[in-house]
Amino acid sequence: MSLIEKAMRNSKKVTSFRHGKVVFKWCDECATLVLGDECAICGSVGRPFSVTAPGDLRPCLQADTELLKRIFYTYFGVPDFLDGVQIFLNKIPGEDRADEIVVDGRVIGVLLFDIVSDDFRLELRIDGARALADIAKKGVVEIDMPRGHLKGKNIPGTMIKRARGTFNANDPLIVLAGDFICSSIARVPSDQVKNSERAIGIRDVGRGRLRIAGKKRCWSRFVEANISYFKTLEAKAVSDVKSYLNSKKDMPVTLSFSGGKDSLACFGILEKASKKFSMIFVNTGLEFPETTEYVRRFAEKRGFELLIADANNGFWNNVDFFGPPSKDFRWCCKVCKLGPLTALIEDRFPKGTITIEGNRTFESFARAHIAFVENNPFVPNQIILNPIREWRSVDVWGYIWWKNLEYNPLYENEYERIGCYLCPACLASEWKRTKMLHPKLSSQWEKYLYAWASKMNMPEEFVKYGFWRWKVLPKKMRRLAADIKISIPTVRTDCIQMKMVKGATPCVAGGFSLEGVVMIPRKRSFAKIAEMMKTIGPVRYSDEYEIAMVKTKDGTIKVFGGGQIVVTSSTPDTTDELFELAVKALLRSQLCTECGICVKNCQRKAIKLNDGPMILEERCSHCGKCTDACVIAHYYDKLVSR
């Protein structure tokens, strides 16, 4: 994964992926996905089919294919229809892992991971029911044709004529009703259907059988069918990179190589655009052994210099102070990624470097508007190029196969993304896989988590079901807590404490600096911290790495998601003043009671309330009157213990 949040721009915009469907094409003649205008093998324009937006389609690799075969065997007794065929997965919103399953250019079902049962389950779609109706050995129920519509109806047990095999409650079923075929779900176990008024729930209805094509197609066939498409992708990316490098001939070139597929694709592009570059790998100290070995082996085999920014024990040295990182509290990224990377670049490239990174807009909401060229405001003189920003996952994989690039073996073990093994952003399904592959690593982290939960007076379920992965629980996790009937605090709380790392001391580069850490309960997202800092000056910030920076005429303020504050200024007094402003902004963002005093005191009407203050930048003059009027800021010295 990338090291720097690409969404760093002069102005931060809130964005989201569009809802709805995305259309792809399938060549029935060659039994493969068509990404370009036509199949490069037979010339077919392909049959359109749709998946849920944003449509970051990816190929289903070995371990995931075996998983799907197990799932279909469990519910319908037929795994063989998946042998040798191309399967694609499309990630959709869900409690944990949720993937649409595309076979023969049709979505036949959704693979879901259930956090409570710690296992996968299947939600059958109508095309899956139509394809399996005749070949399924179990999970098929024939019913009398009811009156009225079928879709959404609950079928009583008295209407069931016969069933193939037994089933459990919540199992997916295929229901046959006259000429209709239905994708359905069992409301009760098969031995209880006769006495149930709600035995089966009908989800969707269709007509006509489908036949999964018997054509066995390896991934080389997919590459062959899209060869012209991949050549066009590469040509544009290489041209973009070459053009920029030619305009900056004096700057050294580096490749951010994380061990993931996206940085691997960037290697293929950069190798064609420039023969002189170094590879940078940030070893967070939390990497999978497979990843560190793969990165070293790849660089050695290809003959490129590998520069390693090593965090060593940075994570374990800080976790007791900060607590477990979470999706909305990623202090670990600064300690384990940004810090080591900054040190490496300052040491090896004092005049700056152009870094090619594998950042894609489809990876997250925060990256939806990345540009080709972006400056990294937190690593001096680093310019980032994002040549595959518009590529989908399926584009990346096809390109890797076409270029015959060796990829990280973890992708063949049910991992969609490659990162730190204990990352809070990883899925519960991936954590289950990690426990199987690396029991020592996983047990070390779980031991720490349970000890921390006990110290925080949290129940064991807080760790067992992954609630620790958020500072502020999202709705889906609050619903989960309610479903399993456990009491979980919606917000992780700690005492507000401030540690001064050092006072206002002279900087090597001139001026003075002051560093400190404010440990504050996170009641709102990091975006709210960045929002409040707008009262001090123009803000640039990153959601993913939780870093916000304000430059004023007196100096610079940087605030990190872990509560770290770094201030530099020309005098000790202005350094102290800016630091105090930063702490007050941090407190106000998290402790605001929405009393409205700041709104009333703002003569320029630059403040609105929406889960805390929202600052209208075009109106704000940074006068500080809102801070002076705020009760929280007024009691700053009493709220924060040094």
Image (cartoon, grey):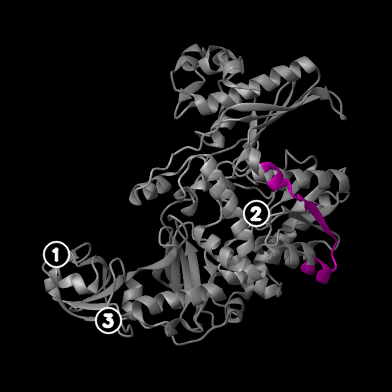
Instruction: Look at discs 1 and 2 and give the one toward the viewer.
Output: 1
Secondary structure found at label 3: loop
**Residue 306 left/right relative to 378:** right
Q: Is residue 165 visible?
A: yes
Instruction: Look at discs 3 and 2 and give the one toward the viewer.
Output: 3
Amino acid type, mark 3: Gly
Q: How many residues crowd around disc 1 within 10 Å: few (fewer than 14), some, or many (20 or more)?
A: some
Amino acid type, mark 1: Glu
> What label does residue 2 carry, if any?
none
Give the residues in magenta: 297-318
Q: Residue at x 53, y 12 (%)?
A: 629
Q: Residue at x 70, y 60 (%)?
A: 263
Q: Quadrant of the N terminus?
A: bottom right
Picture coordinates of residue 184 (x, y %)? 27, 69
Residue 610 found in image quarter: top left
> What label does residue 165 carry, if any?
3
